[in-house]
Amino acid sequence: MGRPFAVRLLWATVCTAPVAVAHAEMSLSATYTLNCSGCHGQDGHGVPEAGIPDLNDAGRYVSTALGRRYLVQVPGLSQSRLDDATAARILNWILMRFSANHLPADFTPYTAEEVARFRSDKASDAKTRRDAILYELGQLKAAHQGNDTGAARK
C-alpha cells in the first residue's frame, strides 16, 4: 500500500511541477488577463457604473498614502492567490500600462514587503474607501489650484 502512494505522489509532483514553473514565469500581461481583465477588461476601463473602477485613473491614487494603501487592499488584489512579489509586480505593471500619465513624478514602485503589509487589511467596503480617496484627491487639487492662483496674483 505504501508503494502505490509513493508512485502517485511522485507522479503528481512530476505532473504539477511544470505548471508551477510556468505560472512563476508567466508574463505580466498574461497575469493581468487571468486575474484582472475579467472585471476591468483588457483595456483596463472597468465598469464604473457597476463599481468596477477604470484602471486608467489608478495612478492618481498613489499621490496619497491612503490611496497607495487602497490599491493593494482592493478585493481583487488583496484576496487573490498571487504571492506578494507577483502582486507588487502586477500592480506596478497596471500603473505603468494604464495610468502612467497620472503617476506622480516621485512615484516609487510597490515592493513585495509593502504589499504584504497593506494586504492584511482588506478593503471590505471598497466603494466607501475609494470615495474617501477621491475626496482627498479633490482637496489636494483644490489646494494646489489655490496656491497657483495666489502665486499668479503676486
Image (spheres, rainbow, N blue to C red):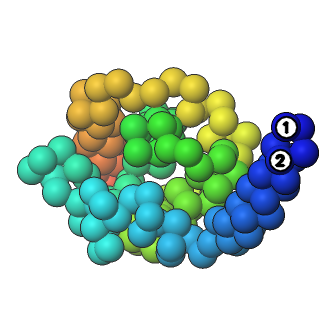
CA gap between label 1 and label 2 equals: 6 Å
For the N terminus, the image quarter is top right
Where on the picture, by quarter, is residue 81?
Answer: top right
Q: Residue at x 83, y 47 (%)?
A: 4
Q: Residue at x 39, y 38 (%)?
A: 75
Q: Residue at x 72, y 65 (%)?
A: 15
Outermost residue on the left side: it is: 49
Instruction: Please provide percent x and percent y for residue 38.
Output: 30, 61
Residue 149 appears in the rendering = no
Outermost residue on the front side: it is: 1
Check the image and report above or below for 18 versus 5.
below
Residue 34 appears in the rendering = yes
> Could you say which is closer to the camera, residue 57 or residue 117?
117
Check the image and report above or below for 45 versus 127.
below
Check the image and report above or below for 83 versus 28.
above
Residue 76 left/right relative to 2: left
Residue 83 left/right relative to 130: right
**Label 1: which residue?**
1
Instruction: Please provide percent x and percent y for residue 152.
Output: 30, 58
> Could you say which is closer to the camera, residue 131 or residue 148?
131
Total tally of numbered discs in the picture: 2
Where on the picture, by quarter, is residue 10?
Answer: bottom right
Secondary structure of the residue carrying tag 1 is loop
Where on the picture, by quarter, is residue 84?
Answer: top right
> Could you say which is closer to the camera, residue 123 or residue 99?
123
Secondary structure of the residue carrying tag 2 is helix
Instruction: Please provide percent x and percent y for residue 121.
Output: 51, 24
Circle number at residue 4:
2
Circles 1, 2 touching at the beta carbon (< 8 Å) = yes
